[in-house]
Image (cartoon, grey):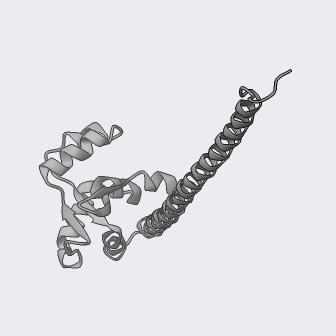
Amino acid sequence: MRLTVIQQKIYEIRGYRVMLDFDLAALYGTETRTLKQTVRRNIDRFPKDFMFQLTKKEWKEVITICDNLPATVKFSPALPYAFSEHGVTMLASVLKSKKAIKMNIAIVRAFIALKQFVLNYKDLASQIKEIRHNVANHSEQLNQIYDAIENMMDEKEEKKHEKRLWKERERIGFKK
């Protein structure tokens, strides 16, 4: 499966990048209720930073943001579980099928690619900030240069004007 398909199923909730139980069940080729049942049987393996259940408010926000959710999921009375990267990894130890293991490897790769993208984005953002700072400095320096040139031109014009006034002055003394 392509990483982009998996990455589209990664959401940010409560400051965690998570995947929801129905997406994981679809990727693993199992039913959502089966996945939840397996997790409940092994609940000790899933602390709060590995898995949590969404509140009604969080679930409404996800429904609002995601247009492509199936109707069966949107209108389900059960609130979904959200699994962090570590929770998804822990699912591999709980779900034993070969498809689940292969899919788990692909999901972990998607999380890693997403982290790499975020790191690259931070580097890019800092470089852009530095360029803006340099451009601002250059702009300020160019303004100073333009002011100096204008002052020099004004001084030159003043000297020309003074020379013209000197030549056009009314002469005193003997006139022809």
Q: Is residue 6 left or right of residue 23?
A: right
Q: Number of callouts in the render?
A: 0
In the picture shown, does residue 158 fall above or below 100?
above
Outermost residue toward the front? 174
Residue 97 location (% of width, % of height): 40, 69
What residue appears at the point 70 percent right and 31 percent down from the top-left corner?
165
What residue appears at the point 31 percent right and 74 percent down from the top-left corner?
94
In the picture shown, does residue 15 fall above or below 74?
below
What residue appears at the point 39 percent right and 60 percent down from the top-left corner?
28
Q: Is residue 67 left or right of residue 7?
A: left
In the picture shown, does residue 67 fall above or below 59?
above
Res 1 visible:
no
In the depicted view, which residue is nearer to us: 149 or 101?
A: 149
Residue 114 location (% of width, % of height): 46, 62
In the depicted view, which residue is nearer to us: 155 or 110?
A: 155
In the depicted view, which residue is nearer to us: 92 or 46?
A: 46
Outermost residue toward the right? 176
In the depicted view, which residue is nearer to us: 146 or 66?
A: 146
Res 88 visible:
yes
What residue appears at the point 74 percent right and 36 percent down from the top-left corner?
163
Residue 126 location (% of width, % of height): 49, 64
Residue 108 location (% of width, % of height): 44, 69
Q: Which quarter of the rendering shows the C terminus?
A: top right
